[in-house]
Image (cartoon, helix red, strand yellow):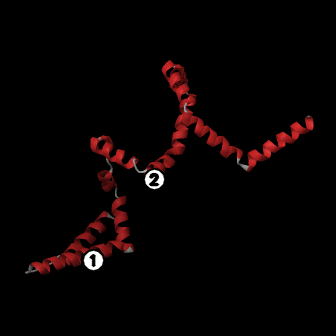
Amino acid sequence: MLKRCSISLLLLSFLLGGCSDSETSKQMDYDETKKMIVDILKTDDGKKAIRDVMEDEEMKQNLVMNEKDVKNTIEKTLVSDKAADFWKEKFKDPEFAEAMATSMKSENEKLIKNLMKDPEYRKMMVELLQDPSIETEMKNILKSTEYREHLKQVLQETMDTPEFQSKFKGLLDKAAKEA
């Protein structure tokens, strides 16, 4: 199979290769050759030839990246200072941040649920919440005007829902009958 592809490529290069005297002719030959090769690769036969080459075990071995290459790539593209600046800039865009949060939501939920089952993690969370400085901060947040306004808005929105109004009406009717 690899022989057939190699022979096809060799034949193609002989057919497409040519000698020319002028520079324009060379450029024109290059552009025409490039177009022809692209057209050939887009055909069913061209796609099949590429698939055959990609299925060859020797080719697969050459394409597989080793762990060291993957690690180096990650370090260069995700962990570098340049990458950190890139991600900081990207997360300033609210649409991008929302899309990332949405795409990661289910995985984050799984992670948190698994962590909550871990006794060591739970112990650390309890210790954190019992820390006097955290407790003081939480009290300050809960007492803040901003939080109270937010809570008021949430309560108002809840009371405006038909479900809440129906339940509240049912409770009032029940209380009136008992009285």
Query: Residue 104: x, y in percent?
Result: 49, 45
Q: Is residue 39 above or below residue 3?
A: below
Residue on which disc 2 sits: 95
- Could you tell whether 80 is left or right of 28 in the image? right
Label 1 sits on residue = 36
- The mark found on residue 57 in the picture is none
Residue 36 drawn above or below residue 177: below
The image position of residue 70, as x and y in percent, is 32, 44
Q: Nearer the viewer, mark 1 or mark 2?
A: 2
Residue 66 in view in this figure: no
**Residue 178 in view here:** yes
Location of residue 43 in the rendering, given as x and y in whole percent from the top left corner: 37, 75
Question: In the structure shown, which secondary structural element does the residue marked by tag 1 occupy?
Answer: helix
Q: Nearer the viewer, residue 107 or 52?
A: 107
Q: Is residue 126 left or right of residue 178?
A: left
* Residue 77 falls left or right of residue 138: left
Asked if the residue at tag 2 contacts the one at tag 1, i.e. Cβ–Cβ closer than 8 Å, the answer is no
Q: Earlier in the sequence, mark 1 or mark 2?
A: 1
- The structure residue drawn at horizontal position 34% and vertical position 68%, both measured from the top left corner, is 49
Q: Quadrant of residue 12?
A: bottom left
Instruction: Name which residue type carries label 1.
Output: Met
Choose between 162 and 145: the one closer to the eye.
145
Q: Mark 1 and mark 2: span between their CA atoms? A: 42 Å
Residue in the picture at 61% in, 38% down: 151
Q: Secondary structure at mark 2?
A: helix
Does 22 sit above or below residue 129? below
Identity of the amino acid at label 2? Glu
Residue 163 falls left or right of residue 71: right
- Residue at point 15%, 76% (across, down): 27
